[in-house]
């Protein structure tokens, strides 16, 4: 899908400071010089095509609930099966294969530490592998979004 | 610092600071949790999204706006806006770069790394013995591997980390990516 100039601006210009006023999409529309319905329709298209994950809040880790970054060293022949099982856990929101002896990395989030620990224990029981659990100790970065460069590349 | 573990079931959904606030009787606790659950997957794409969220959780439009303003002001919400999927947008080279930095230096180095535009996240996490000797993590997203590798070299030099043990873990496959679900 090739992006229109309006879609590029919707993707890049409103990653933070989204209006907290009753008609926020109308406010965006005024900035962009289009109408509110057009903004909503384009955001739906971008969401449906998986370019936009959501229009909403990014919560700070460890301020709500409990979470950890976890990793497993999975034998190559089991990786797909283990990854699929991990992805199906409701506590898992990110799950990546990475180039390392610890080759499967995922983020676990739960309402409280007990549920988090229970999920980690369940993973160890099911996989027979020791989980590396690396909870956040200090956050040095305030996530202000992801600057997009539309000037080059395949997009 | 993470401080004490926080329990969304015992405490209000959101906290003014890193220490847990002991107030199961907090008047907003239950509606905070309902709003958190409703908003974590994003605003409904309708003309009055805050009114729609309020309808779902039993708050007025003004109350929803006021809660989100408060969560932003206290840092519980880092930002409010469009959350993109970088892979779908052509940023397919994604590296987690980890360093073993002396504890006395990690705060200063972390702050310096986080200031680079190419660093999208930067955290201190625990070491785990010989299996995992690294304590400083950052994430770099780029359109291709060579660009990201050059950025890692530039960061390493700029922060004086050449002599520190490090590893660069490029992602291969993304099996799952979505916002957190608290339950």
Image (cartoon, coloured by chain):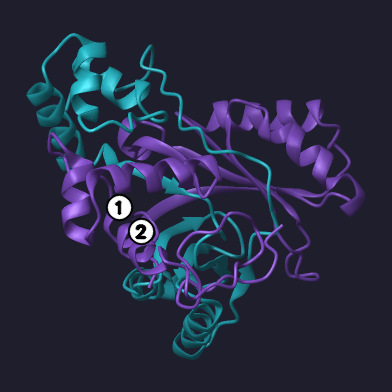
Chain colours: A cyan, B purple
Q: Residue at x 40, y 63 (%)?
A: B28
Nearest the viewer among B146 and A109 is A109
Q: Which mark is residue B157?
A: none
Verify CB contact (< 8 Å) between mark 2 and mark 1: yes
Label 2 neighbour load within 10 Å: few <14, some 14-19, many 20+: many
Nearest the viewer among B90 and B108 is B108
Q: Is residue A3 visible?
A: no
Q: Chain of mark 2?
A: B
Q: Is residue B69 left or right of residue B99?
A: left
Q: Residue at x 56, y 67 (%)?
A: A70
Q: Is residue B73 left or right of residue A148?
A: right
The quadrant of the image that shows the N terminus of chain A is: top left
The quadrant of the image that shows the C terminus of chain A is: top left
Q: Same chain for the residues at labels 2 and 1, yes or no? A: yes
Q: Secondary structure at mark 1?
A: helix
Image coords of residue B98 (percent x, y): 70, 49
Mark 2 lies on residue: B36
Is B38 situated above or below B45?
Answer: below
Image coords of residue B116 (percent x, y): 65, 27
Q: Residue at x 15, y 24 (%)?
A: A39
Q: Is residue A88 visible?
A: yes
Distance in Å between CA atoms under marks 2 and 1: 5 Å
Mark 1 lies on residue: B39
Label 1 neighbour load within 10 Å: few <14, some 14-19, many 20+: many
Image coords of residue B13 (percent x, y): 45, 64
């Amino acid at each position: 899908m090739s992006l229109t100039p309006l879609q590029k601006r919707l993707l890049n210009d409103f990653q933070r400071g989204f209006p907290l006023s009753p008609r926020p999409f109308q406010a965006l529309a005024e900035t962009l010089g289009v109408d509110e319905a057009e903004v909503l329709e384009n955001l739906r298209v971008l969401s449906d095509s998986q370019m936009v994950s959501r229009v909403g809040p990014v919560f700070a880790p460890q301020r709500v609930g409990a979470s950890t970054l976890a990793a497993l060293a999975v034998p190559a022949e089991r990786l797909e099966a283990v990854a699929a099982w991990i992805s199906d856990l409701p506590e898992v929101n990110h799950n990546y294969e990475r180039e390392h002896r610890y080759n499967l990395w995922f983020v676990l989030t739960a309402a409280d530490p007990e549920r988090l620990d229970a999920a980690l224990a369940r993973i160890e029981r099911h996989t027979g592998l020791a989980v590396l659990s690396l909870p956040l100790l200090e956050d040095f970065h305030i996530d202000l979004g992801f600057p997009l460069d539309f000037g080059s590349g395949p997009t | 610092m993470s401080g004490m573990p926080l329990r969304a079931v015992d405490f209000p959904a959101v906290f003014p600071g890193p220490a847990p606030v002991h107030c199961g009787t907090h008047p907003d606790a239950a509606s905070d949790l309902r709003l958190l659950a409703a908003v974590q997957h994003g605003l409904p794409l309708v003309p009055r999204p805050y009114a729609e969220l309020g309808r779902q959780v039993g708050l007025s439009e003004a109350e929803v706006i006021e809660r989100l303003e408060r969560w932003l002001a206290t840092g519980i919400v880092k930002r409010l806006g469009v959350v993109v999927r970088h892979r779908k947008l052509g940023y397919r080279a994604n590296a987690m770069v980890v360093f073993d930095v002396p504890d006395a230096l990690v705060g200063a180095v972390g702050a310096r790394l986080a200031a680079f535009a190419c660093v999208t996240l930067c955290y201190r996490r625990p070491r785990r013995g010989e299996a995992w000797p690294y304590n400083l993590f950052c994430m770099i997203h780029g359109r291709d591997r060579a660009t990201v590798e050059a950025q890692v070299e530039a960061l390493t030099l700029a922060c004086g980390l050449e002599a520190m043990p490090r590893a660069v873990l490029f992602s291969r496959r993304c099996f799952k990516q979505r916002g957190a679900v608290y339950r």
